[in-house]
Amino acid sequence: QVQLVESGGGLVQAGGSLRLSCAASGSIFSIFSIRRMGWYRQAPGKQRELVATITSGGFTNYADSAEGRFTISRDNAKLVYLQMNSLKPEDTAVYYCNALYNNNGDSWGQGTQVTVSS
């Protein structure tokens, strides 16, 4: 399996932007076993929820709350980004990177805190 490290979180005012990055490391075999990467988030007292995913073929999927404001992209097999614009206080959460493998196993990063002030 790969190791995932997120970065780019922080404190921003409502209406601002942040870009999250997720770097995957591990064996070449593990890296190319990833069929989809994604971002999830978990706010205090709430369940973890999907934000956006991108497949190895570049197909993307967004939660309704992210559609039109967030953009997920990949630089290569090892780097995934989440550009977040027009941030709202309700976007405040810990954001986690996820890698889904061809065998349906997955890996999670440690998470990065995003705080949006009103």
Image (tube, rainbow, N blue to C red):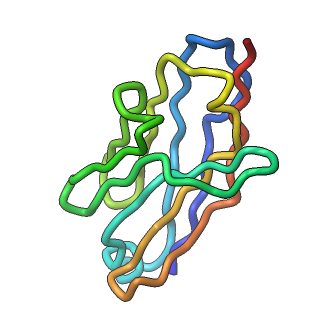
Q: Position of residue 46 (x, y in %)?
A: 73, 51
Considering every residue shown, the one lying at the far bottom of the view is: 103
Image-quadrant location for residue 88: top right
Left or right? Give the position of 48 relative to 97: right
Q: Which of the pair 52/33 is nearer the observer?
A: 52
Q: Is residue 28 above or below residue 87?
A: below
Residue at 52 percent of width and 74 percent of height: 2
Left or right? Give the position of 112 relative to 54: right
Considering the image in quadrants, where does the C terminus appear?
A: top right
Q: Position of residue 58 (x, y in %)?
A: 21, 53
Q: Which of the pair 83/15 is nearer the observer?
A: 15
Residue at 50 percent of width and 74 percent of height: 26
Q: Is residue 77 above or below residue 112?
A: below
Image-quadrant location for residue 94: top right
Residue at 73 percent of width and 28 percent of height: 115
Considering every residue shown, the one lying at the far left of the view is: 57
Left or right? Give the position of 45 relative to 20: right
